Image (spheres, rainbow, N blue to C red):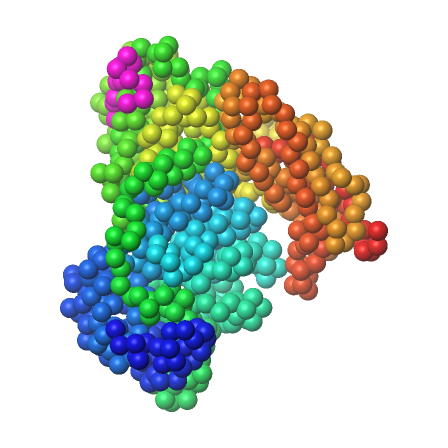
Amino acid sequence: MNASRAYPSGPSEPIEQLVQALLARMTLAEKVGQMCQRNASEGHPPDYLGADLRAGQVGAVLNVVEVDAVNELQRIAVEESRLGIPLLVGRDVIHGFRTVMPLPLGQAASWNPGLVRECARIAAREAAGAGINWTFAPMIDIARDPRWGRIAESFGEDVFLASRLAAAAVTGFQGEDLAAPGSLAACAKHFAGYGAAESGRDYATTSIPEVELRNVYFPPFQAAIEAGVRTLMPSFCELNGVPCSGNEFLLRDVLRGEWGFDGVVVSDWDSVRQLKVHGLTADDRASALAAVTAGLDLEMAGDAYRNHLASLVESGAVEEGLLDQAVAGILRLKFELGLFENPYTDPARLPPLLDDEALATAKQAAAQSAVLLQNRNGVLPLKAGRLQAVAVIGPLADAPHEQLGTWTFDGSAADAVTPRQAIEALAGPEVQLRFAAAMANSRSSAGPGFDEAVAAARDSDVALLFLGEEAILSGEAHSRAEIGLPGAQEELVRRVREAGRPVVAVVMAGRPLTLAGIVDQVDALLFAWHPGTMGGPALAELLFGVQSPSGKLPVTFPRMVGQVPIYYSQKNTGKPPTPDQVVHIDDIDTHAPQTSIGMTAFHLDAGYRPLFPFGFGLSYTEFHYRDIRASAPEIALGESVRISAELSNQGPVAAEEVVQLYVRDLVGSITRPVRELKGFKRLRLAPGQTVTVAFDLHTDELAFHGRDMRRVTEPGEFRAWIGGSSDTELGITFHIRGDTSS
């Protein structure tokens, strides 16, 4: 590479000086080129992008994962263009590259930021070996509607948990040094409110009051920025009437102005031209004007910038200074990634794909993400020495592609170890395994395979049913209006139940499902999400007690879809329900007076409680909480209070528990949620062990945005709870004084 092109002031100069010196040498056409990202997923990209690269008209590419092709694209850019500016190479590396980790929603069920960080680190190093230097992850939208397909990519419904995991994923992808081998630039998406799309329909309208944006939907993005995320992507959807790719309030006022973000803002796929489809603009030229004015730096896949930015500047409609700001951020990122010093990829500098560390991490993540929702009569764990035969039944028992889940472009079904394979290996030859898929896929109708499944169950000691939804049923543009088990799976459960053997259901899915139709038909219920490459071995070890389940729900499970949205941190209403006030629809007398039933906020046909609450998850041992206490009954603003409790393992096995701290601000200038997660810790306890679990809670952590949109902690009375889920009743009250004196 010609160093005089890449380093106008020399490579030892501070990055900002290098950026400004290079920017000063650029023509308008070259600036526009840096703001264009081109799709390179077809054929041999150097053949059809080479001319534009030589002309300096491409700043980034995406979806090329063949390292020789990437290196050739970089060679053309740095050796055959006037300024020798290397390329950003992007890819959706969402939950693994070749080694597929559990879905992000599954990883969130681990409540383990360190593990989420490690999953991202391994994904980054594998992707970097293919020449990728930028991932469009993590997705950190708060998601409270399980009908939305992209809930699979989220970290769930809670602000605190999603914020912690957002920061963990960013640091995992980016590492300590962006220029180090195996690091990728991360991208926080989708800013903002995408998870609140109407009726869970992807891309649909979102209408969110500003105070809710600031208290619920913004914090994970602030956490990602504080963790150093270098790029950000606006949402496809409109927010309060303005599509996010042209939303100046989001991109300039909040992101740049209030938060001081100096990274790159990239559009989602062709979303600039879609401003016209939304009805915000009349044509592509107007769309380019709206997007660049709002603060969108880089257009992905579309050509509105390529075709119109230069003429917009030349006509005076856009100041060239706006382009300078955008291009400076793009160049800054390229310097931070070390691309000017070394634009080429040498896979030999990185560990091989699917190495022992990657597979071990994938297995650990799959195990910690699985949530035990039911275990009647201790049917789990299975005891291999007491079993003669096990029936392994269902469309997902031996479906390697389906267990990988959505957004797995670079994973391979050939690498995945299925539950059927892993159970057979773990149980050994002494246990006979009777397999019956029963259904061709998760959406199939009942057929002759059901008889085979019932026979297998009848001739076995236990029936293991692997149910759920195929990978294609969740993810982007895969929303569902009904979120029960697809096809005839509920009928399959009922038929197998009639065989008279213990029934264990393992559900693999990309979202919470409405499981009220099967919970009474199964003895045990283990929710495994889509667990990835090593899902089979992880599930086998959980089923046979090699490990104890420790996952906790990162999202509430409704009883039926009509309860949606349902989430734990709801507001109280003026008529909150209680168990004694709730009447079921079947118990109402004909012609009963209107006021004869509880006049409170609940559904007549569903009550007010979910099927399983946020934070819930069982273990093979019994954890007991007691003696909650506060270090002081009253503290002043600016001080901290320590909330603690005793946790005991009163069961027979060592196991891990995720201890959770919840708080309620009882009186506020705007009403506050009935509970908010404010801390969690994952602890391992031996049988009989008791520990004190303590959380230090600063008054700043109780702040919220009020009516004036300013963040403040208000004095008053607070309630705190510690327990193993959001419905824990072990609580204590403390006060915050308005003064700061001791």
Q: Is residue 426 above or below residue 68?
A: above
**Residue at x-position 45% and y-position 74%:** 14
- Does the segment drawn in magenta span residue 510? no
**Residue at x-position 67% and y-position 63%:** 710
Q: Is residue 606 above or below residue 291?
A: above
Residue furthest to the right in view is 742
- Does the segment drawn in magenta span residue 436? yes
Q: Is residue 483 left or right of residue 394?
A: right
Residue 725 in the image: state x and y as whole percent.
58, 34
Q: Quadrant of residue 546?
A: top left
Q: Quadrant of residue 628?
A: top right
**Residue at x-position 79% and y-position 41%:** 632
Q: Is residue 19 above or below residue 518?
A: below
Residue furthest to the bottom in view is 315
Please provide the residue range marked out in magenta: 425-438
Q: Is residue 208 above or below residue 439?
A: below
Q: Is residue 512 visible?
A: yes
Residue 41 in the image: state x and y as whole percent.
22, 60
Q: Quadrant of residue 361?
A: top left
Residue 339 in the image: state x and y as whole percent.
33, 67
Q: Is residue 572 left or right of residue 14?
A: right
Q: Is residue 136 visible?
A: no
561 and 702: which is toward the camera: 702
Q: Is residue 194 left or right of residue 360?
A: right
